[in-house]
């Protein structure tokens, strides 16, 4: 009787409930992904490789979940499958808060000493284990719901895929524009769990379990509506994080004098920020890494007065980044008419002001100072003001996003805002011995500077400090001249003395001459926005410092040439075409022409098509996002919008492709091959389009990039649905087809993010990467034609 009731309940579920369920699942997935990735970035001091590895692990495990549930679809009754879906949603709701707590304790569990990087293998394994419950559940959920809904609707895949994409779009937009400002991470966790519980309650029949879920949902809704209710738990979990990082003492030592304490913490749209006080000093952390220490007058005086000795009489100075608590007061000791400080993350300055880290300035100094919460590149491209000195104190080029502060294009924008005698200052980490990775990193930055400025000076030491300007700039490393300039400034300092220049090791003529010769002898391309090689060379340094032992693999990638990859792709395409011709021949034996045999041969080819589409789609999205950032310079404020546009494209493409789900098989083949051609054309033409955007007005560039992101998403979404349709024609059930296509799509996306985003894009640049993607889609086109040929042979 109970089994009959379950079957009746499954049959009575309205179609709209499945749509709401998948929309809620997409919303939960996006919130969970953002929360967990942000938490992992703090734990691992994230760079391009760590971020891409975490995203790849996320996508691969979801794909494995899809393959896993495929084995259950034919073995479980609809009623049992319905209970499995409800259980998966419940697991999503319960797992997320536990995952956040585990991540905040992770460095202690891995026994990583304070300040050290986590090795790549430990990072990848721990990330995969922590993400496993959420990703596996999400991977199983989509095919299972498709199977349930597909029992009465052959167009279920397109509709469910579309609403899941719309839910993800809504989640990304909500977090970026609202939740990050209104809710703490744990409150957002409660909201995400509430959504999953509500979706589970939609499926369950009336009874005690459903009532319990609704009661728990109401409790979570109350917590979300009153965020202070979780404030104490949030603070204790933050202390757990920083205790695991080694920044806070163990609980038994917390009461000791001068023991460290967490003074303040917050999450901004840019990063996680925390202030920790210990032994009379305060340390500012951004995403787990030290950004500034104060009070630290010795370092501040040395840095600022070393720079200002080139022109102590400067009237206008632009400071990009840096430590506002110590560097701004030092700069204002000079008779500047105007000091502009650029810090895009306004939350950072507010956090420092909240704890009194920024000393109050006299009225005269406040009148000379302007604080701008805007991106450095955006400011340089829009301002009409010129400066005598531009100080670039940006973070190291650990990612493609950060490497743009060290690109030729950024320096060109800065050069336009310098006076005839003005100069630019920047610095990049190096080594005394100038080993290969450190030397290549510095050489790529030197090449970018030398392509813009006639005069470039560089210091020696563990940090290469660059001074770049025009022919009329007063740049020099002559000890006596710098000593006289600094002394003539007449500034009374506690620690820095002009006499320092007389024996400064970093401007020793022999050492600076060696640095110039060493950098000139290194054959590396200049760092540019279209080819951000600095991020790759910093990745080599990270591998060495973290003990990840990836240097040989990365160096091998550095020595690989794109023509070798192109030849490999060409050979693969030829083999696929021969395979399709053989499978499609009607002059084969009767055994070869059996439908089951042909179905097995068509499926791998279709799997390759959707895998290449997933790879190309994510890679092209990354290209467009990086280009948006390079041209317009406010990616952080718009990243949620860009992701939302891509998700909207997925949804629209899925709905468009859904129109062909019930059409004859021949129309689906034609449409799938046409979409491959369209994606090939997009990849081939995109570099030229983006080059045109570089010369266009900002509004035109932004609109073009947004349209391209929408178009790429639309092609990916439509082809996903069509491949599902063709897989079903090969005698797969709707749920099994959805599982196979989902796994291939996500596997390709994971590969694209890891290989293209981390290695090939920085090394070879946008032009070469786009052409290789076009070649890959050419092979995919051959695979699609071969699959169609095989399908005709089946008929």
Image: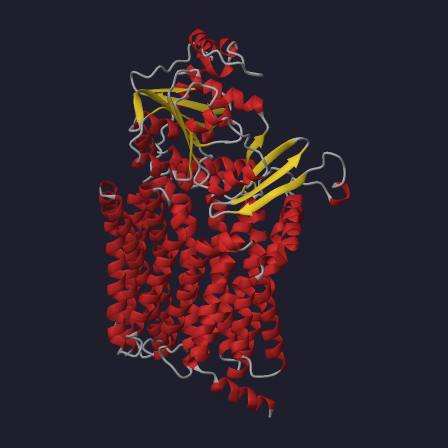
Please state the horizontal and vertical placement of residue 293, each as a whole percent of the image.
58, 31
Report how many numbered discs are placed on residues in the image: 0
607 shown above or below 439: below
Q: Nearer the viewer, residue 466 or 435?
A: 466
212 shown above or below 295: below
- Residue for point 63% across, 76% down: 212
Q: Quadrant of residue 514?
A: top left
495 relative to 383 in the view: left or right: right
Q: Nearer the viewer, residue 656 or 764?
A: 656
Residue 431 in view here: no
121 relative to 603 in the view: left or right: right
- Residue for point 26% across, 47% down: 699
676 shown above or below 721: above
Q: Quadrant of residue 249?
A: top right
Q: Nearer the viewer, residue 227 or 294?
A: 227
- Residue for point 52% across, 78% down: 203
517 shown above or below 677: above
Please state the horizontal and vertical placement of residue 237, each as a whole percent of the image.
64, 51
Residue 726 in view here: yes
Q: Quadrant of the C terminus?
A: bottom left
Q: Quadrant of the N terminus?
A: bottom right
Q: Nearer the viewer, residue 793 or 172?
A: 172
Please state the horizontal and vertical placement of residue 691, each as a whole percent of the image.
24, 43
| Scheme by which the image is coloured | secondary structure
Q: Residue furthest front?
A: 363
Please state the horizontal and vertical placement of residue 779, each as a whole percent of the image.
29, 57
């Amino acid at each position: 009787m109970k089994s009959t009731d379950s079957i009746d309940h499954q049959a009575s579920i309205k179609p709209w409930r499945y749509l709401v369920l998948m929309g809620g699942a997409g919303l939960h997935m996006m919130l969970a992904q953002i929360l967990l990735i942000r938490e992992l970035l703090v734990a691992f001091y994230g760079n391009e490789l760590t971020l891409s590895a975490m995203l790849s692990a996320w996508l691969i495990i979801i794909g494995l979940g899809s393959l896993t549930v495929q084995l259950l679809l034919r073995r479980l009754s609809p009623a049992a499958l319905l209970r499995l879906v409800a259980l998966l949603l419940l697991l999503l709701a319960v797992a997320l808060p536990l995952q956040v707590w585990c991540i905040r304790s992770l460095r202690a569990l891995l026994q990583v000493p304070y300040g050290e990087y986590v090795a790549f293998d430990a990072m990848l394994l721990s990330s995969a284990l922590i993400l496993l419950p959420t990703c596996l559940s999400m991977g199983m959920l989509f095919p299972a719901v498709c199977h349930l809904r597909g029992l009465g609707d052959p167009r279920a895949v397109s509709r469910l895929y579309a609403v899941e994409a719309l839910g993800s779009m809504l989640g990304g937009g909500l977090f970026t524009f609202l939740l990050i400002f209104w809710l703490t991470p744990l409150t957002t966790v409660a909201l995400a769990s509430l959504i999953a519980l509500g979706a589970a309650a939609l499926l369950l029949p009336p009874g005690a379990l459903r009532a319990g879920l609704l009661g728990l949902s109401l409790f979570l809704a109350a917590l979300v509506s009153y965020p202070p209710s979780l404030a104490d738990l949030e603070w204790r979990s933050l202390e757990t994080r920083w205790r695991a990082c080694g920044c806070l003492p163990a609980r038994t030592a917390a009461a000791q004098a001068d023991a460290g304490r967490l003074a303040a913490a917050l999450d901004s749209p840019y990063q996680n920020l925390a202030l920790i006080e210990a032994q009379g000093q305060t340390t500012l952390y951004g995403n787990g890494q030290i950004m500034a220490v104060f009070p630290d007058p010795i370092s501040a005086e040395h840095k600022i007065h070393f720079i200002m000795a080139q022109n102590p009489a400067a009237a206008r100075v632009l400071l990009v980044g840096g430590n506002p608590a110590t560097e701004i007061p030092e700069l204002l000791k000079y008779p500047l008419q105007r000091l502009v400080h650029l810090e895009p993350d306004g939350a950072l300055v507010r956090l420092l002001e909240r704890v009194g880290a920024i000393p109050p300035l006299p009225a005269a100094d406040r009148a000379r100072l302007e604080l701008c919460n805007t991106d450095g590149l955006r400011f340089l491209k829009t301002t009409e003001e010129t400066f005598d000195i531009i100080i670039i104190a940006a973070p190291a080029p650990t990612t493609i996003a950060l490497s743009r502060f060290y690109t030729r294009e950024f320096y060109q924008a800065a050069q336009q805002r310098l006076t005839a005698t003005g100069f630019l200052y920047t610095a990049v980490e190096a080594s005394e011995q100038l080993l290969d990775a450190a030397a290549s990193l510095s050489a790529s930055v030197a090449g970018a500077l030398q392509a813009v400025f006639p005069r470039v000076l560089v210091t020696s030491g563990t940090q290469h400090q660059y001074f770049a300007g025009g022919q009329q700039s007063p740049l020099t490393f002559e000890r006596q001249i710098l000593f006289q300039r600094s002394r003539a400034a007449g500034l009374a300092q506690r620690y820095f003395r002009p006499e320092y220049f007389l024996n400064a090791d970093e401007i020793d003529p022999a050492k600076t001459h060696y640095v110039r010769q060493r950098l000139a002898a290194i054959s590396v391309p200049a760092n540019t926005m279209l080819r951000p090689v600095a991020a790759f060379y910093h990745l080599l340094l990270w591998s060495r410092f973290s003990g990840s032992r990836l240097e040989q693999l990365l160096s091998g990638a550095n020595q690989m040439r794109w023509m070798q990859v192109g030849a490999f792709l060409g050979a693969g395409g030829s083999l696929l075409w021969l395979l399709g011709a053989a499978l499609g021949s009607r002059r084969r034996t009767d055994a070869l022409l059996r439908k089951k045999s042909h179905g097995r041969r068509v499926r791998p080819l279709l799997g390759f098509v959707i895998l290449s589409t997933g790879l190309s789609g994510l890679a092209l999205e990354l290209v467009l996002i990086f280009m948006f950032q390079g041209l317009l310079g406010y990616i952080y404020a718009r990243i949620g919008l860009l992701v939302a546009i891509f998700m909207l494209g997925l949804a629209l493409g899925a709905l468009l492709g859904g129109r062909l789900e019930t059409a004859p098989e021949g129309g689906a083949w034609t449409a799938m091959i046409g979409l491959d051609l369209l994606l090939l054309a997009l990849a081939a033409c995109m570099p030229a389009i983006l080059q045109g955007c570089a010369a266009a007005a900002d509004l035109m560039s932004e609109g073009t990039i947004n349209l391209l992101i929408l178009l790429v998403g639309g092609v990916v979404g439509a082809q996903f649905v069509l491949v599902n349709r063709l897989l079903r024609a090969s005698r797969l059930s709707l749920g099994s087809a959805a599982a196979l296509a989902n796994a291939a799509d996500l596997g390709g996306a994971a590969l694209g993010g890891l290989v293209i985003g981390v290695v090939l894009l920085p090394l070879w640049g946008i032009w070469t990467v786009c052409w290789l993607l076009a070649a890959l889609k050419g092979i995919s086109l051959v695979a699609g034609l071969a699959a169609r040929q095989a399908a005709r042979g089946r008929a």
